[in-house]
């Protein structure tokens, strides 16, 4: 992926990956490239932090899938789709990967660590 060397050459200070199926399927590769380029990577999903992104902040996918199952159950029992309300995610998580922070030589503020839902050591 050409974005990482370009970002490094431009002296960008980090990369933000948005929610996209292309990126979601390549979280391990993206995290590796970001670390190799010396750039912190942020994304919306905790799985990316587990793969090596510096931090993630976004909706809890497991909670979203559980709510989807409730909708499937209601539809299965005869509810009209047009009668079901649109729901927004209600649980968001901040996950910080300290292994990546150390690899990049970054100090994560204690106040940020204190607010994290999970810290990967």
Image: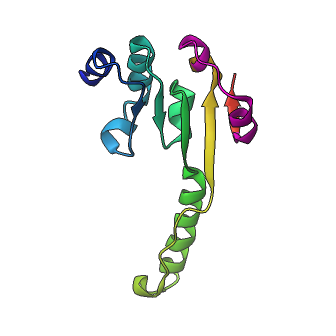
* Front one among 78 and 6: 6
* Front one among 107 and 62: 107
Q: Measured along the vertical axis of the image, is residue 85 above or below residue 32?
A: below
* Front one among 29 and 8: 8
* Quadrant in which the N terminus appears: top left
Which residue is at 42% across, 24% downward? 13
Q: Which residues are magenta?
A: 101-117
Q: Is residue 108 magenta?
A: yes
Which residue is at 71% across, 33% downward? 113
Which residue is at 50% across, 27% downward? 53
Which residue is at 38% across, 43% downward? 18
Q: Residue 32: percent from the left, percent from the top?
A: 43, 18
Q: Residue 95: percent from the left, percent from the top?
A: 62, 37
Residue at the front extreme? 11
Q: Residue 12: percent from the left, percent from the top?
A: 36, 24
Q: Residue 54: percent from the left, percent from the top?
A: 54, 27
Q: How many marks?
A: 0
Is 121 positioned to the left or the right of 37 in the image? right
Q: Measured along the vertical axis of the image, is residue 32 above or below residue 68?
A: above
Q: Is residue 41 magenta?
A: no
């Amino acid at each position: 992926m050409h974005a990482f060397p370009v970002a490094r050459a431009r002296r960008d200070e980090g990369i933000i990956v948005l929610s996209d199926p292309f990126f979601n399927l390549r979280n391990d590769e993206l995290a590796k490239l970001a670390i190799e380029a010396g750039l912190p990577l942020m994304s919306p999903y905790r799985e990316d932090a587990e793969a090596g992104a510096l931090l993630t902040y976004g909706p809890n996918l497991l909670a979203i899938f559980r709510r989807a199952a409730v909708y499937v159950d209601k539809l299965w029992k005869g509810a009209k789709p047009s009668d079901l309300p649109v729901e927004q995610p209600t649980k968001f998580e901040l996950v910080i990967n300290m292994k990546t922070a150390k690899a990049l030589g970054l100090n994560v503020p204690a106040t940020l660590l204190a607010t994290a839902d999970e810290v990967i050591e």
